[in-house]
Image (cartoon, coloured by chain):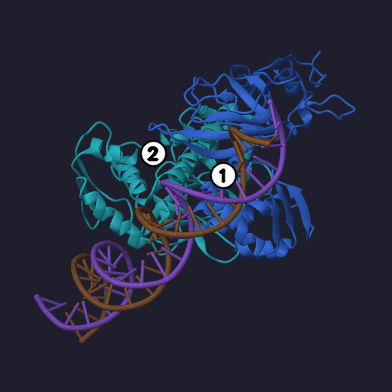
Chain colours: A cyan, B blue, C brown, D purple
Amino acid sequence: MHGDIALEIAQTRKGRVNRRSSRATLSEPPTLRDLRLFASVDSETLSRLALEAKVETFDEGAAIFRQGDLVNAVVIVLHGYVKVLRIASSGDETLVGICSDGETVGEPPSGANETYRVSAEAIGPTSVLKFPAARFSRLMKESPSLCAAVVQDAKDKIAALVTEIEALKAQNADQRLASFILALCPPGEEQCRFRLPYDKRLIAARLGVKQETLSRAFAKLREHGVRTETRDVLVESVSRLAELCD
Amino acid sequence: MHGDIALEIAQTRKGRVNRRSSRATLSEPPTLRDLRLFASVDSETLSRLALEAKVETFDEGAAIFRQGDLVNAVVIVLHGYVKVLRIASSGDETLVGICSDGETVGEPPSGANETYRVSAEAIGPTSVLKFPAARFSRLMKESPSLCAAVVQDAKDKIAALVTEIEALKAQNADQRLASFILALCPPGEEQCRFRLPYDKRLIAARLGVKQETLSRAFAKLREHGVRTETRDVLVESVSRLAELCD
DNA sequence: CGCCGACTTGAGCAATCTCAATCATGGTGG
DNA sequence: CCACCATGATTGAGATTGCTCAAGTCGGCG
């Protein structure tokens, strides 16, 4: 029974989104093993996890969980983008991260009855994998490799957050945008062309600036070989872009 | 042999600092159990860890480890403050955190041969506890409770970093200083008086502003019932301070 | 007593925000 | 198919915030 890690799981739909297969072009069924988090977890544990996993899909803007909610699931993005927000007592929301394919959303799970410290919301149609939190943390106690995977996941998150803080403290808006675009360029190519992953409103929030400031930053980058047309970007010289970030 | 968690460990001195007992007024010997990280770890594992632990002391400004170094130890602050820096390729340093008593420094350990992504440096005389990294991660694999403790530690770090990002994105310098001071006030008291934990240069770096800006922010807070004299602070109304943070 | 480092204060400047107007662009209904 | 509307993006002008440079103050320590 457990040895089959394939995801043969209930597909639940949230919101009004159409059914969509999460991996349209795969010839084999997707497996938990394909997710970075689970790459080095023992098969025994994975097959148990697979029994409990559920896929859910969300529409643009739909809440995946809310700050203050009881943590009842471990969430991994399968397809799409999820924005992670902090909501102050005054009511205003601050974007503190954006998760995409293969990333866990929110903090790593632990045994206790805890509440989310952030809200998570779908950007465009999004599918996620959910595991019951209690079950997941029990398996963590039994499987050192799962536990190690969660620690590694947490480390990755910490590294990303530290990079973010460094950027906010040491770079101006233009440099942060340059870094952002640089991270989207495929490695090893001096010139490239791609589409921005989400709209400029969101990019502005991600970089911690107002929309208008982002627009002007894009205008400045045009003088450094970065052409943009609404959502399409052409980077004429990646190395020149890298110099700007300094 | 293992069952005695007391810290009977080699005391190593780095730099030119004088020997100083890490907990001067304790009537019983300090134990690993006293450290928040280890509060719920099984005694068996703790006693094994204790055999490997070393206390080291550092002078003002001494490097505890450097960005790029191979991770060879898990470090916990016993006494003092440690600043955590990110060093850009351009050479300039950005403060990304300050650790104090009981906190782990740097990222949680994992098995692989990794390098530090940040540098750590003592602020004033500081003593830390060190465990060999390889030994520590082996014990993590054998002890679910140690592993869970590391996950919890990582979660706490993530929560702190998220709070930091929210502050940098959503608050101005005055509000960030107000939040900083608020966090130093003992809970439950409407009025309080205390001493700043480190100098204003460092507080400025922590808040992501220049020293001069911090000085002006302190001046503004004076109009809201926060009196300062060099390093001593008197908060006349904690609730009024809290309103400012909004 | 006088120096040194930490802190403060002032004046001008640069980056970013705010407010407002305008310009695409894509979807919708007639 | 086209006019229209809603939304996102751009641009401009002025206000604010925080930075830079420079001078001055303060307190401790040799």
Binning the other alpha carbons within 10 Å of mark 2 as few (below 14), some (14 to 19) or many (20 upward) gives some
Quadrant where the C terminus of chain B is found in the figure: bottom right
Per the image, the residue denoted by label 1 is B206
Protein chain holding label 1: B
Dot 2 and dot 1 within a common chain: no
Percent position of residue A65, x then y: 54, 56
Q: Amino acid at mark 2?
A: Pro
Percent position of residue A88, x then y: 57, 61
Please indicate, yes or no, whether residue B241 appears anywhere in the rendered image.
Answer: yes
- Residue B216 vs A156, above or below: the answer is below
Per the image, the residue denoted by label 2 is A30
Percent position of residue B89, x then y: 38, 31
Mark 2 and mark 1: span between their CA atoms? 45 Å
Quadrant assignment, res B37 = top right
Q: Helix, strand or loop at disc 2?
A: loop
Percent position of residue A170, x then y: 44, 43
